[in-house]
Amino acid sequence: LFLFLFAFSYLFASPLLLLLHTSDFFPPLFPEFFFRYIFFVLVTMADAALPTIEAKLVLLGSSGVGKTSVVLRYVERVYSTDQPSTIGASFMTKRLVKDGVKIKLQIWDTAGQERFRSMTPMYYRGASAAVLVYDITDLDSFENVKDWVNELKSQVQHEIVLAIAGNKSDCAEKRQVVRANAEEYAASVGALHVETSAKTANDVDLLFDKVASELLVNYRKKKREGGAVGGGAAGASGVRLGDKGNNSKGGCC
C-alpha cells in the first residue's frame, strides 16, 4: 500500500508542483507545505498498516549489577556513573520495527535489594520476556541469577523468552565469571546469553535485539497456529519454565 501510494504521488508530483508554483491562487510556500503533508500522511498510513507486538519485559538481578544503567543505555542512550539504586521498580517503553513488525517493549526495571524481593512477582507476572542481569566481576551475582531462574520456574507457568546478560564487560580484567561457563548455563535453561557494558554501550542493543527477535519468532509461530498473539502470557512462546525438561562498583557498568 505504501509503495503504491508513493509511486502514485511521485508520478503526479511534477505536474502538480508546477501548477502550484505557477498559480497565483496559492501562497508561495503552499507547495512545500502541501508535499510535506502528503509525505506525513503516507508515512502515517504505512506505520498504521504494520502489525504490532506489545511485550512486557522484566529485568531481574542483584543490586549493583547495572540493570538500570543497561536499560537507560538502550532506551535513552545515556549513562551515569552515579546511577541511584532503583526503589521498587521503574518503567520504560521502547518502540522498534523489526522485519516489518512493530514491537513495543514495556520494560520493568526491578530493584535488586533483598527488602524488595517480595514485590518482584507482581512485576514478572504476565511477562513475555525476562532479562536476568549479573556482574561479570561478581561471582555471587551470577549465582543469584540461578536463584532467579529457579524462582521463575516455580512462579511462571506460561512460556517466556529468557535472556541472561553479563554486564560490566568493560572490566574484563576483574572478571570472576567465566564466559564459557555462563554460556553453558544459559544453554542448559534455554536462555540467550550476551555480555554487555552499559558504560561503553557494548552489545546492549544486541541483547535487546536478540530478545526482540525471539518475540517476533514466537509471534509468527502463534499466528501460524491460530493462537492468541500480543503481549503478556498470550504472546510469549519461549522457554516453558515450569517444565522440568527445559532446562556500581569501581566505575564499571
Image (cartoon, grey):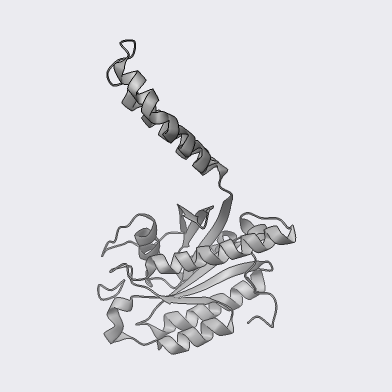
Would residue 117 be visible to someone looking at this image? no
Q: Is residue 225 above or below residue 174?
A: above
Percent from the top left, x then y, of residue 7? 47, 38
Does 183 sit left or right of 232 as displayed?
left
Of the pair 213 and 145, the residue shown nearer to us: 213
Q: Residue at x 44, y 88 (%)?
A: 180
Note whether residue 194 is visible.
yes
Quadrant of residue 240 in the image? bottom right
Measured as percent of width and height from the top left, residue 85 is found at 37, 63
Residue 233 left/right relative to 59: right
> Which quadrant is the N terminus positioned in?
top right
Residue 147 picture location, percent across and down? 54, 79
Task: Name above or below for residue 98 compared with residue 7.
Answer: below
| Residue in the picture at 36% in, 19% down | 19
Going by the picture, which residue comes out furthest to the right?
226
Tell me where residue 106 appears, x and y as whole percent: 51, 54
